Amino acid sequence: MKSKIRYSDLMTTARIISVAIFAVYVSAFPTGLGLIPGLVILALIFLTDGLDGQIARRIDGESKLGAFYDIVGDRIAETVLLVPFVFNQHPGAMIALVYFIVKDFLVDFRRMATFMDSSDVPFKQVSGRLAEFITAGRFMRSFYAVIKLVMIGIFYVWLFDPSEELTALSMAVMIITLIVSFVRTVPSFISVKA
């Protein structure tokens, strides 16, 4: 049986490869890409995260395998994009990296346990309108993606200007990002009713 090429999976694969190349390059040459090109590449990486889901829904059709592959891409991006900033000693990058690794393992364990007892795709495994809004609502998913992009973007700008002011701003944005992430994680572990 010949398998159909899923364009959404190609988009996820392109994102994973782009993240890896960006992380390795910026780790070795922190300011080598230049400020604006580096920020554009980061924005494109985050844009492909939203596009793969749109392509899946409009062209390929949703699939459990595709949904899990998208999550793998998300996890890789969430952690690997922090590596250059840990490597270049941003004061908050290690905190964010450890948080995302622990959170991702716990959430994905919970998703897998729920998935084994259900036919639902990820993000459809929570109950209640509030839980769905927090974890799967278009607004919250978009807001979370934007705030992660802002955090990584400010970390990237910090490589060019590690001033106290930019360090403080990046730490504040990191804390807000981790709080939003934590709030989005809670419904995976408790029942939230609207």
Image (cartoon, rainbow, N blue to C red):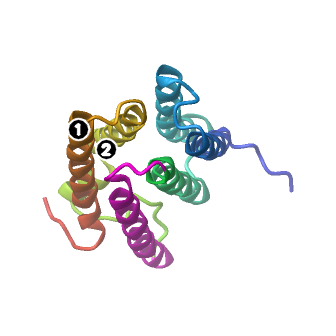
Of residues 65 and 41, the one nearer the viewer is 41
- Is 105 in the magenta? yes
Coordinates of residue 119 in the picture (x, y in percent): 49, 68
Of residues 188 and 145, the one nearer the viewer is 145
Coordinates of residue 131 in the picture (x, y in percent): 23, 59
Q: Do we see residue 124 in this rendering?
A: no
Of residues 142 and 25, the one nearer the viewer is 25
Coordinates of residue 41 in the picture (x, y in percent): 54, 29
Residue shown at the point (39%, 65%) measured from the top left: 98
Q: Which residue is mark 2?
A: 144
* Secondary structure state at the residue bearing disc 1: helix
> Vertically, is 176 above or below 45?
below
Q: Which residue is mark 1?
A: 164
Q: Amino acid at mark 1?
A: Glu
The tag earlier along the polypeptide, 1 or 2, is 2
Of residues 32 and 177, the one nearer the viewer is 32
Residue shown at the point (44%, 48%) measured from the top left: 85
* Secondary structure state at the residue bearing disc 2: helix
How far separated are the C-alphas under marks 1 and 2?
26 Å
